[in-house]
Image (cartoon, rainbow, N blue to C red):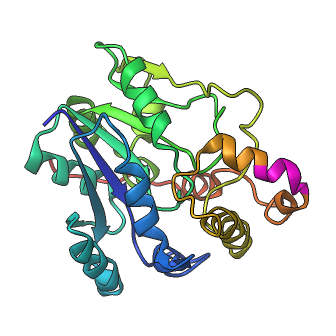
Amino acid sequence: MKYIVMIQARCGSSRLPSKVLKDLSGKPELQWVVERVQRSKRIDEVMVLTSIKKNNLPLIRLCTEMGIRTFIGSEEDVLDRYYQAAKLLQPEYVIRVTADCPLFDWRYLDLAVEQMNPDTDYMAELTESFPDGLDIEILKFSALKKAWKEARLSSEREHVTLYIRNHPELFVIQNLECPIAGIGEKRWTLDEAEDYELISRIYHHFLSKGKEDFITEDILAYLNTHPELETINQKYARNEGLARSIANDKTLETED
């Protein structure tokens, strides 16, 4: 197996509980994420990674119904969750997607795979040129293993690729630039109630026209004619969860 997409999902979000199971035009949000990722032509498999908490049982049941492989691992040490799942399947590359991205554009995943250099250990949108919610990260299994063995900060265990970003001297890192300029400030992720309102309106618009395979350009065109929609969630900053993790950082002891 060369490319496996691992979607990080859980039901314990403090800001918007069970957001991955919230209804979006007749389907759970997580199902839309999985189906949009599956449109990629470059990947071998999509699987969902969740944690051992009991409140994730409905999520696991949904994945079973969809026929999606599910891995259950650590709640707080998400880096360990990714490594243990990847160790079982031994892919050459792990592609990290989070379940709060229901507007995920599979074409950019294919673009990333095509542009990634053979010697690159880690590729991501380092310049944040994509809207928040179109996040893609690709890392070699060998880089994931190194990060798992060496990361000691709690923030680096919670945020899977932070150790790699913090140590560019140890890895070959490549930026993925959005082919559409000037849209990096847009917020299309699902973390707050206002995000859900915006995304629900986008889904309703396209699904009412029978169009499930809407892409970034379609969303931009719709928002261009309804600019008031983008004010719904504009008060929230990007990567607030990461900022909180770093503010509360501590050094951990881990086992090899």
The residue located at (71%, 52%) in the rendering is: 187
Q: Quadrant of the N terminus?
A: top left
Judge by depth and name the residue closer to the eye, 180 or 74.
Answer: 180
The image shows residue 100, relative to residue 24, as above or below, that is above
226 within the magenta span: yes
Question: Observer-nearest residue: 140 or 46?
Answer: 46
- Looking at the image, the residue that sits furthest to the right is 228
Q: Would you say 27 lies left or right of 119 here? A: right
Q: Is residue 172 above or below residue 198?
A: above
Residue extending farthest to the front is 209
Residue at 20% in and 68% down? 67
Q: Give the number of callouts.
A: 0
Q: Give the left or right position of residue 140, taking residue 191 as reference.
A: left
- Viewer-proximal residue, 52 or 204? 204
The image position of residue 34, as x and y in percent, is 38, 59
Task: Residue at 74% x, 71% y: name it.
Answer: 194
**Does the stretch in magenta take in 252?**
no
Quarter of the view holding residue 234:
bottom right
Residue 157 in picture, x, y percent from top left: 37, 52
Q: Position of residue 240 (x, y in %)?
A: 65, 56
What predominant SS class does the magenta segment belong to?
helix
The image quarter in which residue 144 lies: top left
Q: Position of residue 98 (x, y in %)?
A: 45, 55
Q: Which residues are magenta?
A: 222-227
Apparent side of residue 65 relative to residue 235 in the rendered image (left or right): left
Is 50 above or below relative to 136? below
